[in-house]
C-alpha cells in the first residue's frame, strides 16, 4: 500500500492519486471550468484536482465514498464555505438532486474498478448533464469511442454514443499517479446530445438487443439474436444476418429495437374477436 498525505491508498476504492502538476493543469485546462458552472467531482481523493477547480469555482461539490477522506478534505478546504462534500457511493448517487439553475458538469479521475458501471449509471442521468470529463483506463476510453468493426466496439461504446458525443482527449502514463497503476490512462470528454441522433422508441428494448448481441459477439447476428428476431426479419430491415454484432452501427441497433418494440406493442394492443 502506498501512503500519501498520511492516507493509505486503498485498492478496493480504486485509489491512484494524481501528483503530476503538469497533468493536473492539462486536465483542468481541458475541463475549462467557469466560476458560474455547476461542477461535481466524483472521487476527489486527497483533492489534487479539487484544489485547482475550487480556485476557479468555489461552489464545487464532490461525491466521495471513502469516509476516511472526508475529514482530510474538510480540513484542506476549510476556507471554501460553499464547498460541499457528499459522502456517498457515486454508483447509487442521484445526481439530479444537485441541479439548481443549470445542468451539471461532472468530472473525475474515476476509480477504474467501477468505471464501466459508473458510466452506465451516469448515462442514465445524461438529461441533467452539460458535459463530463473523466480520467479512465485507456482501454475504456477506446471502448467508449469505438466504431463498428473495431475490436473493442461493444455495449459501452454504443450506449455512450447513443447519449453523448465522445471525444478522447489525451493519454496519461502511470507515473502521474501514486501509487502508479499497472495500466495507461486517458482523458475523455462526453457531451450529451441536445437531440438524440438515433432515438429508440424504447430504451430498455435497445439495451436488451445490444446486450444480447454482444453476449455472443463472435457469432453471426442470425445466431446471436436468434432468440429475439429471425434471419428473415433482419433481412426485411435491410440487415445482413451473416454479419457479426461488431459490424452493426448504433442506427442498425435502434432499427432492430424499434422493429421488436413495434411488434410487441402491436401484438399487445390487438383485440381478438374470436
Ligand atoms: C483514482 S482515485 C482519484 C482521486 C483524486 N481525484 C486524484 O485524482 O488524485 C478515485 C477516487 O474515487 C473514490 N471512490 C471509489 N469508489 C467510489 C464510489 N463508488 N463513489 C464515490 N467515490 C469513489 C476513491 O476513494 C478515490 O478517492
Image (tube, grey):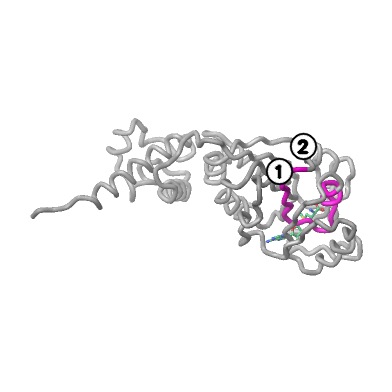
Q: Whole-percent x and y of residue 126?
A: 58, 46
Answer whether labels 2 and 1 touch (C-beta < 8 Å).
yes
- Secondary structure at numbered mark 2: helix
Q: In which quarter of the image is the C terminus?
A: bottom left
Q: Whole-percent x and y of residue 191?
A: 63, 38
Per the rendering, the mark at residue 187 is none
**In magenta stretch: residue 142:** no
Q: Which residue does the image show at 59% across and 40% down from the upper left?
A: 192
Q: Which residue does the image show at 33% across and 51% down from the upper left?
A: 227
- Secondary structure at numbered mark 1: strand
Q: Quadrant of residue 44?
A: bottom right
The answer to which of marks 2 and 1 sits earlier in the sequence is 2
Camera-side residue of 241 and 189: 189
Residue 164 visible in the current orientation: yes
Residue 216 visible in the current orientation: no
Q: Residue furthest top?
A: 238
Between the C-alphas of marks 2 and 1, the distance is 8 Å
Residue pointed to by mark 1? 133
Residue pointed to by mark 2? 30
Q: In which quarter of the image is the N terminus?
A: bottom right
Query: 233 left or right of 170?
Result: left
**In magenta stretch: residue 51:** yes
Q: Which residue does the image show at 61% across and 42% down from the upper left?
A: 143
Camera-side residue of 83 and 63: 83
Q: Which residue lies furthest to the left in this view?
A: 274
How many C-alpha atoms fall within 10 Å of the one at disc 1: few (<14), some, or many (≥20)? many
Extent of the magenta region: 36-54
Q: In which quarter of the image is residue 161?
A: top right
Q: Whole-percent x and y of residue 103?
A: 64, 45
- Against 179, residue 22 (above or below) is above
Camera-side residue of 233 and 83: 83
Ligand 1 location (quadrant):
bottom right
Amino acid at each position: 500500500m502506498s501512503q500519501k498525505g498520511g492516507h493509505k491508498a486503498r485498492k478496493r476504492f480504486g485509489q491512484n492519486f494524481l501528483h503530476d502538476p503538469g497533468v493536473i493543469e492539462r486536465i483542468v485546462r481541458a475541463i475549462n471550468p467557469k466560476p458560474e458552472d455547476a461542477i461535481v467531482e466524483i472521487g476527489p481523493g486527497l483533492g489534487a484536482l479539487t484544489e485547482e477547480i475550487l480556485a476557479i469555482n468555489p461552489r464545487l461539490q464532490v461525491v466521495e465514498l471513502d469516509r476516511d477522506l472526508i475529514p482530510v478534505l474538510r480540513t484542506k478546504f476549510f476556507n471554501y464555505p460553499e464547498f460541499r462534500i457528499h459522502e456517498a457511493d457515486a454508483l447509487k448517487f442521484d445526481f439530479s438532486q444537485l441541479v439548481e439553475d443549470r445542468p451539471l458538469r461532472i468530472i473525475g479521475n474515476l476509480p477504474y474498478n467501477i468505471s464501466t458501471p459508473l458510466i452506465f449509471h451516469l448515462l442514465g442521468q445524461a438529461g441533467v448533464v452539460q458535459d463530463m470529463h473523466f480520467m479512465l483506463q485507456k482501454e475504456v476510453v477506446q471502448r467508449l469511442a469505438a466504431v463498428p468493426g473495431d475490436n473493442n466496439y461493444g455495449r459501452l461504446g454504443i450506449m455512450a454514443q447513443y447519449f453523448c458525443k465522445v471525444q478522447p482527449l489525451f493519454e496519461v502514463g502511470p507515473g502521474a499517479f501514486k501509487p502508479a497503476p499497472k495500466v495507461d490512462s486517458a482523458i475523455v470528454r462526453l457531451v450529451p446530445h441536445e437531440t438524440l441522433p438515433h432515438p429508440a422508441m424504447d430504451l430498455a428494448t435497445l439495451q436488451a438487443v445490444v446486450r444480447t448481441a454482444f453476449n455472443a459477439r463472435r457469432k453471426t447476428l442470425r445466431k446471436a439474436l436468434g432468440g429475439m428476431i429471425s434471419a428473415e426479419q433482419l433481412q426485411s430491415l435491410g440487415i445482413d444476418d451473416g454479419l457479426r454484432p461488431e459490424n452493426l452501427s448504433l442506427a442498425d441497433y435502434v432499427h432492430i429495437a424499434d422493429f421488436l418494440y413495434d411488434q410487441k406493442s402491436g401484438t399487445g394492443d390487438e383485440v381478438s374477436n374470436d
